[in-house]
Amino acid sequence: MKPPRRRCGLLAVLVALIVLASLQIQYHHLKDDRLNGDHTFATTTTIDQVQWRTGAEGLPRGIVHSHSDMYLRPLWDSGANPKNKNDNHTALLAMAVGISQMQNVDVMAHKFLNQNYTVMLFHYDGNVDGWRNLEWSDKAIHILAHNQTKWWFAKRFLHPDVVAIYDFIFLWDEDLGVDNFDPRRYLDIMVSEGLEITQPALDPDLSTDIHHRITIRNKMAKVHRRIYDSRASMNCSDESKGPPCTGWVEGMAPVFSQAAWRCVWHLIQVQILISSLLGN
Ligand SMILES: *[C@@H]1O[C@H](CO)[C@@H](O)[C@H](O)[C@H]1NC(C)=O
Ligand SMILES: *[C@@H]1O[C@H](CO)[C@@H](O)[C@H](O)[C@H]1NC(C)=O
Ligand SMILES: *[C@@H]1O[C@H](CO)[C@@H](O)[C@H](O)[C@H]1NC(C)=O
Ligand SMILES: *[C@@H]1O[C@H](CO)[C@@H](O)[C@H](O)[C@H]1NC(C)=O
């Protein structure tokens, strides 16, 4: 039995953007904390004459990097990072996947790898070998842990310091239809509009899974931040401050800027799923 494929047509042109007020507040708060923290760390260097530093001071100049990345490096070759020549964004696509969605994931991974974006697959069903035949399999990073959600994986494997070289993080479900989606164009829009947390708009003709009007593609605009509806049940206007009128991104397909991810990662708790925060 082939499991039903949930189709959500994602359109690059139209981005339903939502900045979550609470996330923003938290983010600024955290950022301040972090900056203060770093400052303290950098200046408070002596405790009983012991220098509290990173531990890398003994290494020769020029080889110390403050951040990590997810680029694969062959043992026999220093392997320069695949620089994306066409644009200046680095991006990471991370998905929790099961073998039953392999066909769909294949399409998604192709789109991102073609742009030299990194692809990371979290295998929740224990089946990694089933993916080996895919031509790009060796280019992706595979992580296996049974029966975990993408938020569980993200908390443990996408620490902000580890993924700090990525400008954007796509933390997506495995069953999204990306036929009309262009990741690079999408990121151009995020950059030009200065967006921090977004999701692609859903194509009502292709999606079977539309739960909120704000997620539907608006053909008149590249980006929409709110919807308008004067019916009493919705009453969405410029005055509206929250869902269902504005301030809404679904947990299904969020895209985070690097700065937003630093905030969101801290909000993901070991037990509490951030899905509820993001509105899914
Ligand atoms: C991806 O990287 C390869 C190798 O560095 C390069 O030849 C290619 O042009 C890059 N592709 C894009 C879309 O930038
Ligand atoms: C990349 O960045 C350079 C310098 O910041 C800028 O001049 C150029 O237009 C950018 N290219 C793209 C495709 O955004
Ligand atoms: C994962 O969940 C499935 C379905 O509930 C169960 O059959 C399986 O034993 C679980 N696997 C592990 C390793 O816990
Ligand atoms: C709609 O919202 C506006 C402003 O938020 C409010 O003044 C008005 O009473 C609301 N109308 C209805 C029908 O609830």
Image: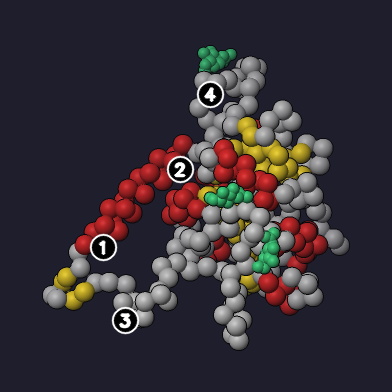
Q: Residue at (24%, 72%) from the top-left corner?
A: 52
Task: Give the answer, above or below, for where 25 lies relative to 85.
Answer: above
- Crowding at dot 2, Cα within 10 Å, few <14 / some 14-19 / many 20+, comes out as some
Which residue is disc 2 drawn over?
23
Quarter of the rendering occupied by the C terminus: top right
Residues 93 and 102: in front is 93
Q: Which residue is mark 3?
A: 58
Asked if labels 2 and 4 touch by Cβ distance under 8 angstroms, the answer is: no
Numbered tag placed on residue 41 in the rendering: 1
Foreground: disc 4 or disc 1: 1
- Residue 235, above or below 257: above
Between label 3 and label 4, give the one nearer the viewer. 3
SS at mark 3 in the image = loop
- Decide: marks 3, 4 in contact (CB < 8 A)? no
Q: In the rendered view of the protein, which quadrant contains the N terminus?
A: bottom right
Disc 1 residue type? Phe
Residue 201 placement, left or right of 33: right
Q: Is residue 15 left or right of residue 181?
A: left
Q: Would residue 124 be seen by someone viewing this image from the given angle?
A: no
Which labelled disc corresponds to residue 240? 4
Q: Which of the two labelled residues, at mark 4 and mark 2, occupies the earlier sequence position?
A: 2
**Picture coordinates of residue 210, whole percent (x, y):** 72, 39
First of labels 4, 1 by sequence position: 1
Quadrant of the picture in which ligand 4 is shown: top right
Disc assigned to residue 120: none
For badge 3, the amino acid type reads Gly
Residue 181 lies, in percent from the top left, at 74, 48
Report helix, strand or loop for mark 2: helix
Question: What residue do we see at 30% from left, 58% from top?
Answer: 38
Q: Earlier in the sequence, mark 3 or mark 2?
A: 2
The residue positioned 38% from the left and 44% from the top of the image is 28
Asked if marks 1 and 2 touch (Cβ < 8 Å), the reply is: no
